[in-house]
């Protein structure tokens, strides 16, 4: 089981896990977007590696990025991740956890 913080308003969605120096192995952050769309994420000002899991409105996993690394350069030079599929939710967990939990596209997450 993963305990998550839920991000809903615009400020929360933009800030996410920026500036945090750690994330416990059983913790994560769930981003709830206002409408289904293709949402790209980046690691600017994020200090810890993360796995990112995009889910559709039914909580089916539609895309996973494993172990995205912190971006320590200018914002305009940071790579963008995901956003290739329509999603309503994005879950960020510590890097390497998606594989440890056996997460794969097509699976449904429960909460």
Image (spheres, rainbow, N blue to C red):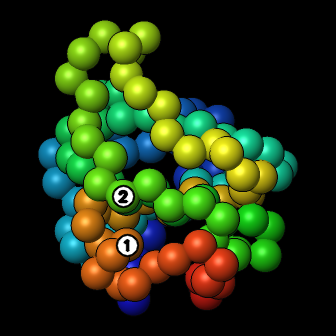
Pick whichever of labels 2 and 1 is earlier in the sequence: 2
CA–CA distance in space, label 2 to label 1 = 7 Å
- Nearest the eye: 75 or 62: 62
Q: Are marks 2 and 1 in contact (CB under 8 Å)?
A: yes
Quadrant housing the N terminus: bottom left
Residue 82: x and y, percent? 56, 45
Marker disc for residue 8: none
Q: Is residue 89 visible?
A: yes
Residue pointed to by mark 2: 66
Residue pointed to by mark 1: 98
Residue 28: x and y, percent? 38, 65
Residue 43: x and y, percent? 36, 35
From the viewer's perspective, is residue 101 above or below residue 14?
below
Q: Residue at x 41, y 27 (%)?
A: 79
Residue 17: x and y, percent? 36, 45
Q: Is residue 13 visible?
A: no
Q: Residue at x 33, y 75 (%)?
A: 99
Residue 97 falls in image quadrant: bottom left
Callout 1 secondary element = helix
Q: Residue at x 61, y 83 (%)?
A: 107
């Amino acid at each position: 089981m993963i305990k998550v913080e839920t991000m809903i308003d615009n400020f929360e969605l933009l800030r996410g896990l920026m500036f945090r120096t750690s994330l416990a192995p059983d913790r994560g952050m769930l981003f709830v977007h206002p409408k289904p769309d293709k949402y790209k994420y980046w690691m600017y000002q994020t200090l810890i590696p993360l796995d990112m899991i995009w889910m559709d409105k039914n909580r089916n996993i539609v895309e996973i990025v494993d172990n995205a690394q912190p971006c320590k350069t200018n914002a305009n030079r940071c790579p963008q991740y995901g956003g290739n599929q329509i999603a309503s939710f994005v879950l960020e967990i510590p890097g390497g956890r998606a594989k440890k939990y056996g997460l794969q596209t097509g699976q449904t997450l429960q909460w």
